[in-house]
Image: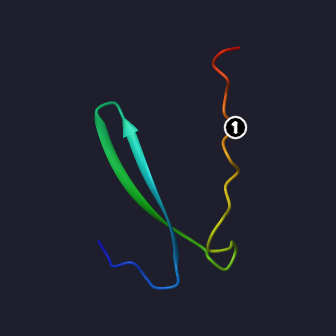
Amino acid sequence: MQFLKDDYTYLAVEIIRGDTIRYALLEIPSDKVPRFVNLPQKRRVDASR
C-alpha cells in the first residue's frame, strides 16, 4: 500500500459480504468538494409511539 498524500481527501469504506470484511480507501478529488462536509443530524425516533 502506498502512503497517503498530503492535501488529498480520502474516504474509508468497510465492505461486508457474508463473513468477509474488506476495506477500501478511495481518493476524492478535493478540488471539487470542501475538505470537511457537515452531515445532517440524525433525527431520533420515539419508540413509545
Q: How many labels does the image show?
A: 1
Up/down of 27 relative to 22, above or below: below
Q: What element carries label 1?
A: loop
Up/down of 37 relative to 35, above or below: above
Q: Give the left or right position of residue 28, taking residue 1 as reference.
A: right
Screen quadrant of the N terminus = bottom left
The amino acid pointed to by label 1 is Arg
Structure colour scheme: rainbow
Residue 15, by quadrant, is top left
Q: In the image, residue 9 lies at what x, y percent?
A: 54, 73
Closer-to-camera residue (27/44): 44
- The residue pinned by badge 1 equals 43
Up/down of 45 relative to 36, above or below: above
Closer-to-camera residue (37/6): 37
Q: In the image, residue 17 lies at what x, y percent?
A: 37, 35
Up/down of 5 relative to 40, above or below: below
Q: Which residue lies furthest to the front in this view?
A: 48
Screen quadrant of the C terminus = top right
Q: Give the left or right position of residue 18, taking residue 36 as reference.
A: left
Residue located at (66% from left, 33% from top): 44
Q: In the image, residue 43 lies at what x, y percent?
A: 69, 37
Residue located at (63% from left, 19% from top): 47
Residue located at (62% from left, 70% from top): 36
